Amino acid sequence: MSSKKFHLPRRAVQIVTLLLFALIPTFGIFQIDLASASFHVLDREIWWSNFAFIIGLSIIIATAPVITYMTIGAVWCGWACPQNLISEWANNLTYQFLGKRADVRVDGKGVVIAASKNRAINWIALGTIFLGASLILAFIPILLFYPASDVLNFINISTGQKVAKHLEYPYFFAVLLIFIDIALVRYFFCDYGCFYRMGQRMLKSRDALRVTYDASRSADCSKCNYCATSCITAIQPTDIKIHDPCIGCGECIDACDVLHDKSGTKGLLRFKIGESIGATTWWQKFREISSRFNWLVGAVFLLGIGMMIWGVVMQAPIQPQLSWDAQQKILLRERVCNKQCAQLQSSCNGNHMEGCYLAAACKCECSLHEDPDNSASGEWRQCVRKNTERANTLSLQKTNQGIPVRQINP
């Protein structure tokens, strides 16, 4: 029996895509900072007012889907989209716990449960697994908006460090949304909430890569319906309409090939581009896809990439984003030192500059005491020495000139 050609490669691509969604913000390649209204791209902060970057990003968002519609069709949905990966996994798990025809989705025909599987233990096990997956997956959107160090502190409570409590509400809100998506929504989001899918349905072309049925060999089709039972989106692969929600996963092709391999014949389903019947190898399919590529749209897409690169290059590098704990440590140090040096700060005025110098020396000395291992400790020591010397010099000058020197208790 032949092995499935598309299932394992498709699953590998889906998992790699999901990992990229998690790793890109984790390593700071791309993040969104709502507080400062900017993007973080590598080591640069790109303000939302950066015309070149924002226009370039908009061009890419507008043209990239069009390019895929015209070439690889819905293959992104079936081979890379994390939403489809999660939905497919949730469906398979539901079949395992609640029956092979079970359906609990909001867009289904109603709750369908196998009588033998409709037990509390099955529902509890299924819900627990969905909740566990939600708790893990929720970190992906959180990493897009918060530094990885904050997320690590939020997870690693055993370190004894103060937990990043500002992450609690957004994290658990993300958990709730993902749990609802996994448990109930699934492909309903693809059909009615995904802008990519809506555009794909509007612009779908028969010239793009798609699954086709060899009607000339219909006599070889045993009407077993095996391909339909293998279809992820529950359509009829032998009669796919242009607006059917086919995601180009290839599962029906694998099913038909495996079945017909028993009799030594080829399956009746295959991927096809345009009306050509000669493209059988991956290289031939690639050439067919390239021949249907709209180079005007491609040029606009490349223009968008160029504008984004230009926008990144024109922005100055930024310092690494501080973690929540580091920010809180700085605020605590400032609060303690401001209180300790308050008297000296109040004495600082134009007629008493030595008080200003002493106040500056006091804050630097306090910072050293509160955070001796800070990388700026050398600068703080220099600050104490120089400002103390300046205060002493001014006091000596006033004494020599017979000007009363104001005594300050540091």
Image (cartoon, rainbow, N blue to C red):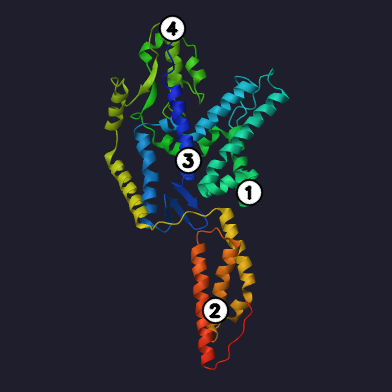
Secondary structure type for disc 3: helix
The amino acid type found where label 3 is placed reads: Leu
Residue 344, horizontal then vertical, whole percent: 60, 77
Q: Is residue 246 visible?
A: no
Secondary structure type for disc 1: helix
Residue 142, horizontal then vertical, whole percent: 55, 45
> What's the CA distance linking mark 3 and mark 1?
22 Å
> What's the CA distance linking mark 4 and mark 3?
43 Å
Label 2 vs 4, first from the N-terminus = 4
Residue 333, horizontal then vertical, whole percent: 60, 63
Q: According to the image, label 4 marks what residue?
A: 262
Label 4 vs 1, first from the N-terminus = 1
Label 2 vs 1, first from the N-terminus = 1
> What's the CA distance linking mark 2 and mark 3?
48 Å
- Above or below residue 62? Residue 265 is above
Residue 40, horizontal then vertical, whole percent: 45, 52
Q: According to the image, label 2 marks what residue?
A: 356
Quarter-of-image position of residue 315: bottom left
Label 4 vs 3, first from the N-terminus = 3
Q: Is residue 67 visible?
A: yes
Q: According to the image, label 3 marks what residue?
A: 23
Q: Which mark is residue 327?
A: none
Secondary structure type for disc 4: loop
- Above or below residue 67? Residue 286 is above
